[in-house]
Amino acid sequence: MEQGTITRILQLYGIEHDDILAPQKGYRNSSFAILRGGQPPLNLILYKNEPGMLARIIRTNAIGNFLHARGMPARRTFSPRIMQLKSAHQTRHAALYYYVSGSTIPWEAYTMERIKTLGKTMGNMHSILADYSGDLPDIADELIALNRRMVRYFVEPDVARAMSQKLNIKIKQPSFMRLLASCKNQPSQALHMDFVRGNILFEGDDITGILDFEKAGRGTPAFDIARTLAFLLIDCKYKSEDKTYKYFIQSGYTKRSASTFRAWQSVDRLVQFFLLHDFYKFLRHNPYEHLEQNEHFVRTKAMLLKHGIIERAHVK
């Protein structure tokens, strides 16, 4: 059924094609490579039905086009038209893009050089996005709201009891409100906020594609840096915390990029906030009894213990 839908959408765009490759499915959408004989391939994305999706697509496309026009390997639109597909039960949207070469790589393939390149590319992106004036959500406000939800969850007596009995942990520092409020007062600009493995395409050691600006917002670059660094610290399991920080921040972002951001004082605490958020998502969406089988959960828990954000409920 989806193949027929894609064919109809391409007809509306006036695109003739030779083949539609099997979709790559993400959290919010399905992505189709469109082959056109001797012409460059295209990429059609069929977005999921979610509230506010049209506005999100418009923002996403505007930022991608802005970056691409200034030399960054961001995905850009082939056509400004956004198609609406209405049925009795839902409305979905589709957009057509130029195909971006390269591929995502597993975390194990994030070598020293690639982590440095990731930091450099983020810094260059921030340098360009400092001039972006489009309307975007306020990231500090979103994170403050998230912090409130996390605190409400962690202080629930049943949750605290289950964490203690089943995981032998308790939350030592559940709130980051003061940190987030101070970040709201820092200079802000457009940010990606999902600059992670699934949205970064490599060819060799070079980044050839930056995808998915759906979580983009406006805030201090420390938000973007800390969000990506938190992922790297957990998922690049064969590299120490110090080396990952050095490669991404010092050797990549600071030394190699055009960014002038140097307000590092909040980054470490923001990393802890994002790690606790990831920990919170594990707890919300999985039976506690199964969590110790999840390597990412185990590593996240270990790092939060190390940094004193959580602690053992019962000392053996």
Image (spheres, rainbow, N blue to C red):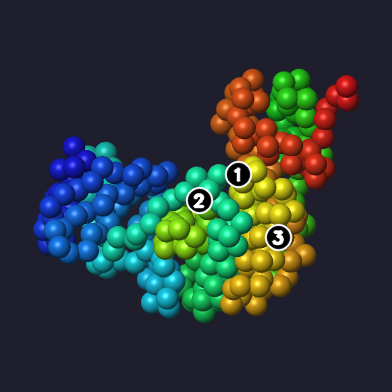
Residue at the farthest right position: 315
| Mark nearer the N terminus (3 vs 1) | 1
| Mark nearer the N terminus (1 vs 2) | 2
- Looking at the image, do the residues carrying marks 2 and 3 touch, with CB atoms under 8 Å apart? no
Q: Amino acid at mark 2?
A: Arg
- In 3D space, how far apart are the residues under numbered discs 2 and 3 (Cα atoms)? 19 Å
| Mark nearer the N terminus (2 vs 3) | 2
Which residue is labeled 2 in the image? 197
Q: SS at mark 2?
A: helix
Q: Residues within 10 Å of mark 3 (few under 14, many from 20)?
A: some
Quadrant (top left/top right/bottom left/bottom right) for the C terminus:
top right
Which residue is labeled 3 in the image? 246
Q: Is residue 281 visible?
A: yes
Residue 111, relative to residue 131: is it above or below? above
Quadrant (top left/top right/bottom left/bottom right) for the N terminus:
top left
Which residue is labeled 1 in the image? 235
Judged left or right of residue 63, residue 297 is right
Disc nearest the viewer among 2 and 3 = 3
Q: Residue at x 74, y 41 (%)?
A: 303
Q: Position of residue 132 (x, y in %)?
A: 49, 76
Dividing the picture into quadrants, the one containing residue 119 is bottom right
Q: Residues within 10 Å of mark 2 (few under 14, many from 20)?
A: some
Q: SS at mark 1?
A: helix
- In 3D space, how far apart are the residues under numbered discs 1 and 2 (Cα atoms)? 10 Å
